[in-house]
Image (cartoon, rainbow, N blue to C red):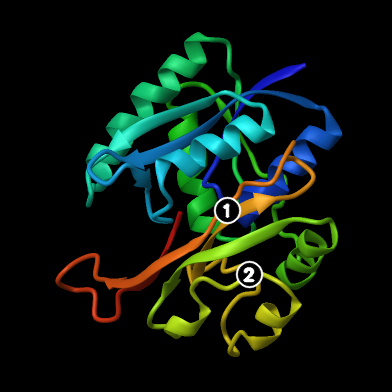
Amino acid sequence: MKQAVFNWSGGKDSAFALHQVLSEKKYHVQSLLTSVNHETKRISMHGVRFELLKMQAESIGLPLKTFSLPASPDNKIYEAQLLQTMTELKDAGVEYSIFGDIFLEDLRKYREEQTAKVQMEAVFPLWQRETSKLVKDFIAQGFKAIVTAVDASKLSKEFVGKLIDTEFINALPNGVDSCGENGEFHSFVFDGPIFKQAIDIKIGEKVHQYYSDEDKYGFYFCDLL
C-alpha cells in the first residue's frame, strides 16, 4: 500500500478527505501533519487549542506529527519548517502527501511545488468536487463541525461558533463558498465516521483579531474548550 502523510487542519475538508482516503484503502496514512503556533499552542490559522488537536488524532487512531511556527510566520520560515518536516517523513518512507483542497489552482500548484522538493507526490481526494454538494454530503454522513474562525470582510460575528448544518449553509451570504474554500470560514470537526468517539467541546470566548497592519477587517475567532 502507498505510504502517505495527511495534511490535517482539524477542519471540515480535512476530515471529509481523510474519510475518503481511509475508505478507499489506496494509501496507508502514516500520520496526520499539522502546523502549530508555538506561542499560543494552537493550530495555525484555525486557532484551535493543541489539546483538542491531540484528542482528534487519538479518536481517529492515527499518529500526530506537528511542526512549530511563530505567531505571524513569513513564507520563508514556513517553507523552511515544512521542508525539514517533509524530509523527515520522506526518510521514514512516505511517498505521498494528501491535502483537502477543492478548487484553488494556485494553492494546488504551490502544494505540488513544495512536495516535489522532497520527491513526494501531492494528492487531492476532493479536487473539483462541487462544494455545495460536498458540504451536504459531509453533514449527511454524520460529521459534526463548529465554525472556529470567520473572515470579517465576508461574514459577521454571528457565524463564528455555529454548528455547520443545513441552517448554517442556507444562511451564508451570496458569494461565500459553501465550504469556505476561499478562506471565508474555518472549522473544527468533533464527531463523524472517522472518530472512535466524539470530542467533548464547549464554546468559549469570541474575539476579533487582525493579522497585520494592512488587514482592514480581521477575523472573528471562537475559542473551543
* Front-lying residue, 146 or 119: 146
- Could you give the CA–CA distance between mark 1 and mark 2, rounded to whole angstroms? 12 Å
| Residue 82 picture location, percent across and down | 37, 32
Q: Is residue 51 left or right of residue 74?
A: right
Callout 1: few (<14), some (14-19), or many (20+) C-alpha neighbours within 10 Å? many
Residue 154 seen: no
Foreground pick, 14 / 203:
203
Q: Residue at x 28, y 31 (%)?
A: 80
Element under disc 1: loop
Q: Secondary structure at mark 2?
A: loop
Disc 1 marks which residue?
A: 11
Residue 182 is situated, as x and y percent measured from the top left of the image, at 51, 68
Residue type at the position of mark 2: Leu
Q: In the image, what residue type sits under mark 1?
A: Gly
Q: Along the horizontal axis of the image, is 39 left or right of 7?
A: left
Which residue is located at x 80 percent, y 27 percent?
Answer: 26
In the displayed structure image, the side of residue 195 where residue 67 appears, left or right: left
Name the residue at 74% across, 36% down.
Answer: 196
